[in-house]
Image (spheres, rainbow, N blue to C red):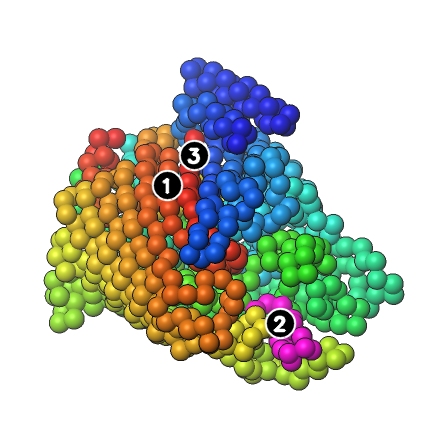
Amino acid sequence: MKKTLLVLFALIHFITYSQNQLPNVKLKNLKGELVNSNLDFQKKDVLYVYSFWATWCAPCVQELDAISEVYGDWKQKISIELIAVSVDDSRTEKRIKPMVNGKGWEYIVLLDTNQEFKRSLSIANVPYTVVVKNNKIVYVQNGHSPGGESEFFDKLKSL
Amino acid sequence: MKKFLFLITICTSLSLFSQTKTNSEKTKGRLFGGFESNSQWYLNDVERGINHPEQPIRSNNYLLLNYNYGKWTAGIQAESYAPKPLLNFNPKYEKTNLGTYFLNYKTEKIDVTAGYFYEQFGSGLLLRSWEDRSLGINNAIRGGKIILRPSENISLTGLYGNQRTGFDVAKGTIYGFNSDINLSGILKMESSDVSVGFSYVGRDEKTTIENPNFKELTNSFAGRFNYSHDSFYINSEYNYLSEDAILYPITVSNIFVKPGSALLTNFGYSKKGVGLDVSLRRIENMNFLSERNPEVFSPEQTSLAYNDRMMNFVPSLTKQHHSNLANIYVFQAQKSVSIVSDNGIAKAGEIGGQIDFFYEFKKGSALGGKYGTKIAINASNWFNLNGDYTLYPPDYKTDFFATGEKYFSDYNLEISKKFSSNLQGSVVVINQFYNHRLIAASLNIQVNSFIIAPEIAYKLTPTKSLKVSAEHMWADSDRKNWAALMVEYNHNLNWSFYVSDMYNYGFDKNSNLIDDVSDHFKIHFYNLGTAYTKGSSRIALSYGRQRGGLVCAGGICRFVPPSSGVTLSLTKSF
């Protein structure tokens, strides 16, 4: 127990020093091309929304479905690009393409099959959203609240 | 304890370091990582006859710290299973210790790691080292790895090392080479994507068997291709594992030596509003371990039960349901040879397939209504390999394309629909067949089940929402019928609450039971919990009963014993 407390202590010690830059990991897109998770998304003032999801994660799919319906509107109002990072392993990765196309999602999709990107951000559970602007992490959201899109959009506008 | 203090010292110095950086912003050094803690307070449950273990409060904790400076990154992961790990985790996870460490140098063309690393070749049928904390899997390889990317279309990987087991490494030495070549990029093909890959994995382990009928170095090879054109795609891979001794029953046998193989083909068609995907797979004798003999903890429990020292990843190709009841009879891929002379069970692998179909009825159409209607159909069927099996001396000769006795099947349909801007619903119907006798090489119990699971989500205000999920399962044997209900309330982006119950009202003590020890009465599995999230932090607290059974992620499962108690989990990344 003491040790656990110590770990917690060490943790609290750290909280103030947050990671402010996204790690760069090479991931495949749906065409099999290698994409840099950070270096390929560095346009000035664009909000890059990295949404970590999986085909088997119901709240993730719900969230991406909900955003998909308003994505066109959002793009007209702010400079935004959503990157849906799938953490599906080889059990379910074959379902990604038919699901993304079947649902008509217009996102950039990256495949984090062995979870290197997820691990580099210490993500325990999906859905998990990281917003990057001008190469700095400006917002992180752990989990999803159904219907939270409008709240999320307000947040994005303020960044 | 000393190690811990040492760690904290490192942390402190590193964090001071990072602070200097943020203040000056002249250099690029930065500290990042995360913390995860999963604790459980096991309680007595008089009705279930469960006494909490001697140490009722148990906790698994992980602290990952990385430091990056330009092209260099170094990291450590400390793990603490104190005072004891959660029930039924690998007993080799003991106390507090350093789990992994690494040093990495990375540029556009080269990526070198010394220390512990994770890697997957192709789909992982020959080699996958990864971490899954909920399953207690961390089979990182300790050694060296180099990835070369001479052009953006070619990636070459070489690796060497020993696989992690508990806080130690396994005896077998692993050698690996992998190549991925994007041909369409090289040939500048515009309309099609073509890529190929080749892998080699070797495992070298001394054996104590005299005059072995197998080589100490086991070689494995894989070749694969991907092709896609417009809406159509196909990919396939073949894996071969050279002759090696098979576990018979739980130690390697010099009289039972066979090669292994895996063939996987996947194809599909998808465009906006429609998707079809078909996967076919044949697996024979693909139990590839970094140490031939599993560690035996007790006559019934070996390291295999904890997914320890697995070199490859053979996931079950079935739908991963989120319905609770559909996860009672869950299929695990049958990659190993098992010949049991006592009850006549003989199997050498599996053959079967899975089909997925996604379709959207457009907005405004008769079935689509105002918001459209989405359907997903999935079907999977898995069988033993057909062939001639001999119980003693153990032997088999399989046919390449023929199915034997059925292990498992799952046919399911999911319809989801938005009714208004506030109301959304879905329904899933599932029919499963589970052949316990053949899957577990145990009691002759076969279960046919039918599940229906409707769910509605209602948005009360822009941030508050309510979700109600009901489920019912009719099963023709084992514990028979179940009913379940879950109510979830999301207050805002930060707070959520749930309460649930799973009731097994079909229990009959006179029927044959898969678990013939625990919970022999009509039982309620009630649970309630709450979660708070802010930024990258999440705290979740719950109380309730846990059914004994398999907890699975990605088609790999861990057995959890029946328990009652309080669970606290904490995650934070920084």
The kind of residue on which mark 2 rests is Glu
Determine the image quadrant of residue B319.
Answer: bottom left
**Badge 2 and badge 1 in a common chain:** yes
Say the numbered circle drawn on residue B284.
2
Instruction: Please name the residue that numbered disc 1 is placed on.
Output: B540
Q: Residue at x 27, y 62 (%)?
A: B470
Q: Residue at x 62, y 63 (%)?
A: B222
Q: CA distance from mark 3 to mark 2?
A: 41 Å
**Magenta stretch?**
B334-348
| B1 displayed left or right of B236 | right
Q: Chain of mark 3?
A: B
Instruction: Please name the residue that numbered disc 3 is placed on.
Output: B573
Q: Residue B342: say if magenta.
A: yes
Q: Is residue B67 above or below residue B246?
A: above
The kind of residue on which mark 1 rests is Ala
Q: Chain of mark 1?
A: B
Q: Residue B420: say if magenta.
A: no
The kind of residue on which mark 3 rests is Ser
Q: CA distance from mark 2 to mark 1?
A: 42 Å
Q: Toward the viewer: B337 or A71?
A: B337
Quadrant showing the C terminus of chain B = top left
Q: Position of residue B9 (x, y in %)?
A: 58, 21
First-in-chain label (3 vs 2): 2
Q: Quick check: can you spot residue B294? A: yes
First-in-chain label (3 vs 1): 1
Q: Position of residue B210 (x, y in %)?
A: 87, 63
First-in-chain label (2 vs 1): 2
